[in-house]
Image: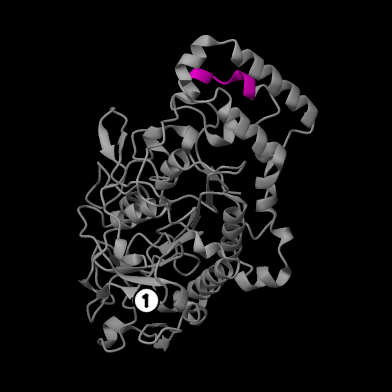
Amino acid sequence: MLSIPGRPGRTCDGYSRRELLRVGGAGLIGLSLPGFFRLRAAPAKVDIQPRAKSVILVFLQGGPSHIDIWDPKPEAPTNIRGEFKPIKTKVDGIQVSETMPLLAEQMNKVTLVRSMSYTPSGLFNHTAAMYQMMTGWAPDKVSPSGQLEPPSPRDFPHMGCQVSRLRPPDQPMLPFVEMPRPLQESNVIGKGGAAGFLGKAFDPYRLYQDPNKDVRLEDLALRPEVSPERLKDRFALLKGINGSMKELEKAVGSYALNEYYEKAYDLVLSGKARGAFDLGHEPGKVRDRYGRTTFGQGALLSRRLIEAGARFVQLNWPAVANGNPEVDSWDTHAANFAPLKNLHCPVLDKGLSALIEDLDQRGLLADTLLVAVGEFGRSPRLGVSTSGNVNAPDGRDHWPYCYTAVVAGAGVKRGVQYGASDAQGSAPVDKPVHPTDLVATIYYALGIDPHQQVLNDLKQPRALVEGKPVLGLFG
């Protein structure tokens, strides 16, 4: 299990979701209730018809090469097209790289957005680009390299945190789960991956463990010394105490006094979340189809969490964004082709294709929006420097000007390409999509108005996201 810096428990920003779930001790009674309930803002009323009940975001942190995976350019010069050949897919006229043979068989279920693009303003490196992709807002403070300061309570919230606030589950289930590791570039950990100015009560449930191994979930279970009956007694006592506190009633306004406690109480006693995390319930052949890897089993766990009622699941590529490509990272400055062919693409191909197929066969793709994307692509030309990094002759640098996203489910068109890149994969020639537009599309699919306003840390009104939804993705 990864150990992330920081102290658990109470902070000036409120209580983390994990602390709320640590029931069985004095925590339930000891919370500062008026302050806690003020963290929750009233859901906005929108006229948008929801298309999705839930979202799975497969975030390929590190920036995979679009040309070598999703958008091959066989007619380009050798120093652009690289070593891989294109292969046919289930859709006439759409090819992918030979590195993705299993995904090619699922292409009739997805839309390939080959026109993801933005022009960086100090956003050349991973952290700032990831912040933009997660929050829908460009960061306020960016160094010339694109690096950022550590996470701050003044940050814009991750979209999943806003979804937790605006579309909480209607059953005892975790609203937003992030796994199996945090967003990270060097020593900047978790930037853009938290609730920011919404407060820690809306942070994701962070399962920073390898789902391909035994998963520990002590915070979703009663402590051994506390029986369910004892917890019920404590909860009844708490309700009685709350019922006599008129000032508290004023503080929470029209919200039920015990709403958050009831959710934590039901979540633990129902065992639904713990059951969803238990991959032992899956047949061996299903687990094998996804691949017995951290990513593959994370993809299977994503399906189980959505099936159990989670609203937003984020599966991060299990590597530091700027890690070693020879081991686990998409950051292929030093080498591009061997790591993609032998390590990363087989894992991605197996896990992502299984997730698409499984969601579809179970009928979950009808109301689950699936998005697979990185923070940027890689440079079309080999061996050049576009971000100040040193690249090997067969390495590709960062490239935000053109890359690809895979989008499926919740009314998204099947078996089509949206937008197009030029002959070298360097720029869109049709229907460019900014990362903030993709974030707005996720809100839109959930029936959330992306232009509704939220108050930031300075109580200034801001839209949920800077972009606008891409309506052309939907049928």
Left or right: where 210 falls relative to 443 = right
Q: Which residue is mark 1?
A: 416
Classify 10 Å Cα crowding around label 1: few (below 14), some (14-19), many (20 and above): some
At x 22% / y 50%, what residue is drawn? 144
437 versus 353 height, above or below: above
Q: How many marks?
A: 1
Residue 279: x %, y % from top left: 69, 58
At x 56% / y 49%, what residue is drawn? 310
Residue 147: x %, y % from top left: 30, 49
At x 47% / y 74%, what residue is drawn? 109
Left or right: where 280 falls relative to 388 = right
Residue 207: x %, y % from top left: 58, 48
Region rendered in magenta = 28-34
Left or right: where 58 falls relative to 244 = left
345 versus 20 height, above or below: below
The colouring scheme, among rainbow, by chain, secondary structure or one colour, is one colour
Q: Which part of the image, by quadrant, shows the C terminus? A: bottom left
In the rendered image, residue 318 lying in the magenta stretch gets the answer no
Identify the element where label 1 is drawn.
Answer: strand
Residue 430: x %, y % from top left: 21, 72
242 versus 11 height, above or below: above
The amino acid type of the residue labelled 1 equals Val
In-front residue for pair 341/335? 341
At x 51% / y 29%, what residue is drawn? 15
- Snapshot quadrant of residue 270: top right
Main SS, magenta residues = helix
